[in-house]
Image (tube, rainbow, N blue to C red):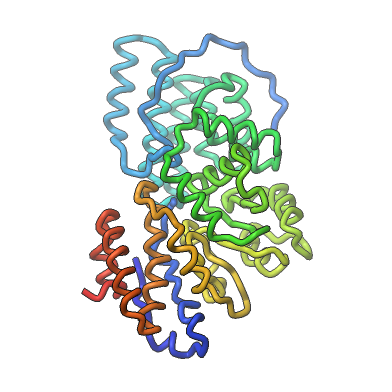
Amino acid sequence: MIEPFHHRRVQRHKNPHMSARSVICIAVFQVCAALQVNAQAAPQQEQVRTRSNVKEAYQGGWAPTSHALLNEREGSVAKDLDDRALEAAAQLDGFRALRNDLLVTTKGHLGPEQKDRLRAEAAQLERSAPNSFEAHLARYYSEFPAAVAFMQLDLATARDRERPELIGPQLGNSARLDSETELAHWSRAMRTRGNMAPGLKQVADDMLLSMEQDAILIAAGEMDAYPLWTRQYADGFRRDVLVIDQRLLVDAAYRQRMWARSRSRGPVPEAAHFIEMIATSTSRPVYLSPALGPEIPTAMLPSLYVTGMALRHSNTPFDNLTRLQENWVRLSKTTQAGPLSQNYLLAGAVLLKHYRDMGDEPRAASLEHELRGLAKTLGATDRLIRTGVFQH
């Protein structure tokens, strides 16, 4: 939830533009936003194409789904049609619906208990449809981001490369391998048939707007990284920004590649310290996605500045408020991006506090009116009152 703004802490800053330095309130919006093998392919079988009723997070699947209803659908399909392929497709729908529910309840941060539950569901699918596309894809999700997950993704792709369920996972895999050719291919697939939620494209544009040239962005996962890569590699927009998916940092080869791409100095750190170390090891400006939430190292919080829909790291005083004022009027402020839309309230709250501290009542009143409209749509009004952003 949003922490109150502490007036006494702000008074210590002599420069009024620094008034929001340590008041970025990361804990407020912990959103999800909410992260090869040369195997011989099994003999090709005729694929049964079904239209899935389950949306991925990047397609708008950020609300709880009815996992129980999907299980009922799975049983009825098997009973009425007696078709193993259709039964497997229904089981995969049930698995993906369960994963969505777990992502919602954990705010995008699956723990050991949730991972074990996914593994159990994937094992059940493997027993009923061994060596199927659906079994391999379920294994991919249940083991992600471990190396074995991408082995399973390769096996699923060998079964049917054109299945739309592969687009997101293969886009992430292309980034893991840092393959521009594959990033371009799967980004175009995402744009043409990936059914990405339009609001997430708007958020991606707003995040890129919030960053200066040659920046590095640490992204949280599929809801912020996938739209950013699509804008870069399918549309050719802001290719100067290096987007790093924090979920993939467990892969030593990925860390090595990103360390080199970021022009960082010194040895490549372990995953647990990568974000902190890259911020002080490169001359490129480093930004963090607000969607990282609890993944942001606590030690970095006092050195983060809100510039819009991104958080700029700086160990020296940084005038983020001038930039935030300029960016705010250009942000789309979409309310159609699920939990990521909450981060507009974070940026607006920082700017509102600045106007109040400066005694600029006209701009404070106008901005508060705008924020109240956003908060009402997003269901956050009571929270902003409780935390002091709105005074009544």
Report if residue 176 is visible in the image.
Answer: yes
Residue occupying the far right of the picture: 266
Front in this rendered view, residue 120 or 68? 68
Which residue is most to the front?
362
Q: Residue furthest left?
A: 392
339 shown above or below 184: below
Check the image and report above or below for 6 versus 192: below
Residue drawn at x 72%, y 26% is 38
Residue 98 sits in quarter: top left
Q: Where is residue 226 in the image (x, y as percent from the top left)?
A: 54, 43
Which quadrant is the C terminus positioned in? bottom left
Front residue of 116 and 269: 269
Q: In which quarter of the image is residue 376?
A: bottom left
* Count of numbered tags: 0
Question: Residue drawn 69% across and 63% down?
Answer: 284
**Residue 191 percent coordinates (x, y):** 52, 33
Quadrant in which the N terminus appears: bottom left
Q: Is residue 24 left or right of residue 365?
A: right
The answer to whether 67 is drawn above or below residue 382 in the figure is: above
Across and down, in percent, residue 281 comes to 72, 67
Image location (x, y in percent) of residue 291: 47, 56
Vertical relation: 184 (above or below) 132: below
Residue 387 shows up from this direction: no
Q: Residue at x 70, y 61 (%)?
A: 269
Taking the image as shown, residue 390 lies to the left or right of residue 154, namely: left
As rendered, which of 275 and 18 lies closer to the eye? 18
Q: Nearer the viewer, residue 355 or 173?
A: 355
